């Protein structure tokens, strides 16, 4: 059986933990067909970390949203991927 899946990860100001998440995903036995990492207006280096990963791995896609000044849980997460 050929398992295919997509992962969408919204992030904001995660420069300390995003590299660990990327490393974890790279070590998975069955990687996703696509991993969309949505930068939800980060003020730190999260955006550049995502861009670097996307340049190195064709199955990682970076999406960048404008900073609205705060993290918005629930509906904000949904908005970040639309």
Image (tube, rainbow, N blue to C red):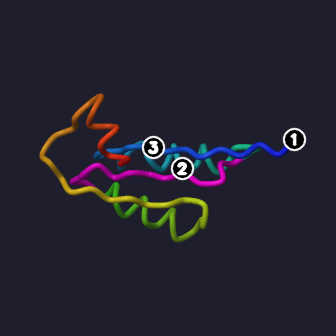
- Identify the residue under disc 1: 1
Quarter location, residue 16 = top left
Residue appearing at x 48%, y 50% in the figure = 19
Choose the circle earlier in sequence order: 2 or 3: 3
Q: Secondary structure at mark 2?
A: helix
Describe residue 44's horizontal placement relative to residue 14 as left or right. Answer: left
Closest to the camera, between mark 1 and mark 2, is: 1
Residue 22 numbered tag:
2
Residue appearing at x 22%, y 38% in the figure = 71
Q: Secondary structure at mark 3?
A: strand
How crowded pointer 2 is (Cα within 10 Å; few <14, some 14-19, many 20+) is rated as some
Choose the circle earlier in sequence order: 1 or 2: 1
Residue at the limit of the structure toward the bottom, as seen here = 55
Q: Position of residue 22 (x, y in %)?
A: 54, 49
| 32 inside magenta stretch | yes
Q: Relative to 70, does residue 35 appear above or below in the rendering?
A: below
- Identify the residue under disc 3: 9
Cα separation, mark 1 vs mark 3, equals 25 Å
Q: Relative to 78, does residue 54 appear above or below in the rendering?
A: below
Q: Secondary structure at mark 1?
A: loop
Q: Position of residue 66 (x, y in %)?
A: 21, 57
Closest to the camera, between mark 1 and mark 3, is: 1
Cα separation, mark 2 vs mark 3, equals 11 Å
In this view of the protein, which residue sits in the foreground, 25 or 61?
61
Residue at the limit of the structure toward the right, as seen here = 1
Q: Magenta part of the protein: which range? A: 31-44
């Amino acid at each position: 059986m050929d398992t295919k899946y997509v992962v969408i990860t919204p992030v904001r100001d995660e420069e300390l933990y995003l590299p660990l998440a990327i490393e974890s995903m790279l070590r998975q036995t069955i990687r996703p067909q696509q991993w969309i990492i949505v930068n939800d207006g980060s003020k730190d280096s999260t955006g550049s970390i995502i861009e670097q990963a996307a340049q190195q791995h064709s199955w990682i896609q970076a999406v960048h949203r404008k900073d609205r000044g705060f993290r918005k849980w629930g509906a904000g997460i949904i908005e970040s991927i639309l």
